[in-house]
Image: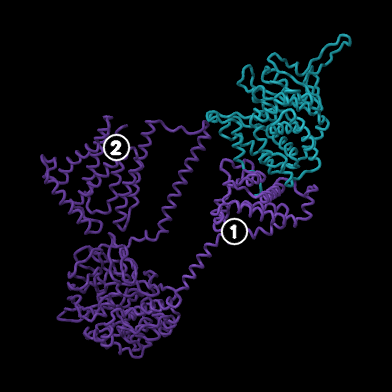
Chain colours: A cyan, B purple
Amino acid sequence: MSLGTQHDGHGGDVRGDVGAVVAVADRVRGAIETVIEGKPEVLRIALTVMLAEGHLLIEDVPGVGKTMMAKALGRAVDCSVQRVQFTPDLLPSDITGVSVYHQDRNEFEFNPGPVFANIVLGDEINRASPKTQSALLECMEERQVSVDGQTRTLERPFMVVATQNPADMEGTYALPEAQRDRFMARVSVGYPSPQAELDMIDAHSSRSPLEQLAPVTNAAEIRSLVDRIHNVHMAPGMRRYVVDLVNSTRTAPELKLGASPRATLHLVRAARAHAALEGRHYVVPDDVQALAVPVLAHRLLPGPEAQMERLSAEQIVAKLVARLPVPGPR
Amino acid sequence: MRALMPLAALVSMLAALPLLNGLIRGGDWWIPAAVLVIAVAAVSALYRLSGRNSFPVPFLQLIVAALLFTPILTPGTGFLGVVPTPDTFHQMWALFQQGVHSINTSAPPVPSSNGLRMIIALTFLVFAMTADFLAVTARCPGMVGGLLLALVLVPLAVDSTGLAWAQAGICAAGFLVLLATDMWVRGREWGVRVPDGHDPAGRFTARAVQLGTVAAAAATAIALALSLPLLVPSLRTDAFYTMADGSQFGSSGNVTTTHPLVSLRRDLASSSDRTVLTYRSDAEDPEYLRTFVLDEFDGENWTMSPVYTGRDSNLDGPLPLPPGRDEEPDASVTTRVSLDSDAPRMEFLPLPYPARSVEVSGDWYVDSDTLMVFTTDTPPTGFNFVVESADNRPDARTLAEAGPPRSLSDNYLVLPGGIDDGVQELTDSVTANADTAYERAIALQDFFTGGDFTYDLSPPAIPGDADPLTYFLTEDRIGYCEQFAGAMAIMARQADIPARVAVGYTAGQQVGDGRWSVSVGDAHAWPELYFEGSGWVRFEPTPSSAQGQGSASAPDYTSGSEAAPESLPDPEPTARDTPEPTETAEDEPSASPEESESPEGGPTDAAGGSTTGSDGSDRMPWLPAVGALLAGLLLLAGPALARALVRWSRGAAQASGGVVGAHTAWRELRDTCLDLGVEWSLTESPRATAARLGALGRDGTVLPSEAHAAVWRLALAEETARYAPAPAEGGTAAAGGTADSAANGDRLAADLATARKGLTATATGGDRWRAILLPRSLAPWRRPRVAAEAVPAVS
């Protein structure tokens, strides 16, 4: 089924604070959809990650709108947005910023890098050297920057939206597993449907829709929404369900590397955000099921047998989800 | 290596030879078989050493076997001593027939003969060649087990003593050697299977799992092997003589003899005075000739418990000591019996009790409890035998002083339930004044012979609802020896005297000096009572003389006059002393002229019973049919009723609303789906299930929209019940839910009804009927289950 909000008509229980989340999300969604049409799934994951205070990895072939998606998200929220184009010669200081000596004042002044923003677009992150990649990834995890022995905290909300081309494209450094693990979710945009592509021609021929995109919310509102996410109820059975699911990736014979405990935390947070986006104040298995592939798949390494059977990590996760019984009364 | 498998097959065949050990008398029967088996294996092993195609092996084996066969089994017939000639085959055929004959005519152990040796050797030759082919050429050594099983069946089927542990063990060990050799050879050829896992612990677990699996499979097989035969009634019994029914005697197909009581009735009823046998005895007053002993009363008839044949029951040498006797009694009476050639075949010999030795040709067996002598062959007619027997007439004082039975099975006191209480009361009143077992026995015999009873070979029919025993003892008191003997034996058992019924012939009529003639009319039944120290002693409750069984005679010791006259309840003991076996048997037919028209007049009780039974069925023939129909309908409606009961039992929980109500309603929806054959998965969340049910239609039909909406509401209620915070934690919506939980429950019930209707409407006709008649949700194995590998790690 489509996990939209249509069920609300059947009596879904929307509480006040969750209602605000839905309202804001609908606004953002509407704004972005003027730029990119026909990708509600990707958009929903992106919003979920934003509300769960995670980072998003968009992986796909060039030209399908990865950057456009990230930019639109940044524009829809009225907050500081920085964009870094990763290249092989990019240095860590190009991201974190450098201290520059001011002769007239006789002191070092810190010039903040592009990481000091609410939304950071890391374009083609896999084109940078591993050294630079890890500088960004450290900021993502710590939410702070240490330069010259001084630690500077990054402002909330802080979200890195990185795009990358598939690893087998030319001139790329694949992200190591440890760094992929820091992204809450990975999505791929995919080609638009013929109808969406047709609409796209019309929309992009005359003007740039991105320019006309007006912000529909701001950083402070997003911050308050993020705080409400923590109040979303997660039943004990649902917690067990998440642990069982993550655990099944560790015992699955098809997988060489299972998901980390960090993945468990990410999945729980994302599920809460997802529930709130759906207008529920409690998490249901459908939330976890909808998020299992984007949240888990990029952290897993299929074993040789799965590779031989051409089973992708996504397919394996879907299989594990389909095997696990949902929590219920016994 | 190449020669190993033929040798292993040889070992398994040689290990099977002892299986036949118990069946054949004489020590050298196995030599030809062993020589041939070894030769065949040697040929196979030597040839396979060459490594060539194994196609010629059986032919080479046949040639070698033929060359060996001639000098060993048919010496002197071969060309140059070894090459078979037509003579060889002629002699083989003769030997074969001889062997078959000796197998067919003698019971195991069969004396070893050339024919038998040849048959065994041939059998083992064929088996060894087959085993060699299976184990070596075809590489399926497990199949050899089938051959061995066939050999194991031989002693099991033929010998009632069955299989000794040692024989079975040796055979099994040989088979195991074959299997182990095969595994070893395979391991050498292909390498051993590498166990899973690299660490020793993992290997250990894998090993343990393997062992556990093997142990479980073996335990299951053993448990089945032990329990299944108990459940299959026809697989019991190695008895040769069992009571199949009233008229058939012997169920295992070996001997079919009419029931002694039936043939007794027939004999007594026949109007002819055919001579059955004549005998010459050196006793002045010969004992009765006893044929059968009936030692079990089944509530209606006296029957014989199975008797067994076996090596230890062979009739060679003296017979076993009669029960109750401590020392060998003097075999003082010699009786030479010659059976009339017109008389019916006798599988059981008529013998005076207690017989001490019997000289008779053929295979005869003796039952040690009863000293019955019988055969499993079809006996010839008109043969002679000599029997030496002891004098079994203890004096009354010995009997009176006999203690309680010590060395006797309690079975002789057992009576089935269901005997009329009146019989016990009668026994008590008859034996009221008697102190010892002997006095009670005398009192019982006097009760029958005291004049109250009438001897009649065609007693009047017994009313259908009356118990034949009670009717005979209390009402009409008319009967013949069968009734008298049976009733007295029952009453004796009630009076704590071990008793049984003997069937045979009276001493008959003296036709010359020491020569006696027994005719059909002398057929008789009498009770035997047991007294410690004297053993089984004959009593005679049947009236003798012209008004009774003509040639019957009460033994002297039953007069009681010598023992304790003052304690005897009967005032005129001498009255019964008078009947002497002087009456001829010719009175008998004249006493029953009218009953010869209906030869089956004896078992009138059975006939009466059957007529009343048919009356009952005539009156209401439709009653059983209607009953069966109703029962069938009830049976048919059973599952539907059970399902309705389950649904009804959920009603209360549903109506309460809230969490329990939602769960219950959801479970009922699940069962409805299961009934209709709609898939239900435990890995689907409620809303996913609802979404799937919405697109249920198989041939384009979809769930009606109102039903779909109802399913959605049920799913959301279930979802809230499962995953939302408990109402106690607060929340406006939940508070509203608790306020009118009854209305909530009503809504659940209404939604459930709508959903059920919609689902049923969408299902095909067959599924709908099935859901009503055979609801799948009642079957636990139809419930949705979780795949084994997906069992949650956290519980």
Is B55 positioned to the left or the right of B145 in the image? left
Q: Residue at x 81, y 26 (%)?
A: A79
What chain does badge 2 belong to?
A: B
> Residue B249 location in percent, x, y?
31, 68
> Residue B414 location in percent, x, y?
41, 72
Mark sitting earlier along the chain (1/2): 2
Q: Is residue A320 above or below residue B73?
A: above
Tell us which disc is closer to us: 1 or 2.
1
Q: CA distance from mark 1 to mark 2?
A: 64 Å
Residue beneath disc 1: B643
Q: Is residue B545 above or below residue B304?
A: below
- In this view, the residue in front, B595 or B99, is B595
Q: Work out whether residue B281 can be spotted.
A: yes
Q: Residue at x 17, y 46 (%)?
A: B73
Residue beneath disc 2: B6
Q: How many marks?
A: 2
Query: Are there few (<14), some (14-19), or many (20+) residues within 10 Å of tag 1?
Result: many
> Residue B708 location in percent, x, y?
66, 49
What chain does badge 1 belong to?
A: B
Q: Amino acid at mark 2?
A: Pro
Q: Residue at x 29, y 33 (%)?
A: B3
- In this view, the residue in front, A28 or A274, is A28
- In this view, the residue in front, B35 or B326, is B35
Task: Tell me the element at label 1.
Answer: helix
> Residue B783 location in percent, x, y?
57, 50
Q: Quadrant of residue B529?
A: bottom left
- In this view, the residue in front, B617 or A3, is A3
Asked if both marks, 1 and 2, belong to the same chain, the answer given is yes
Q: Point out the image quarter for the N terminus of chain A.
A: top right
Q: Is residue A52 above or below residue A283?
A: above
Q: Residue furthest right?
A: A105
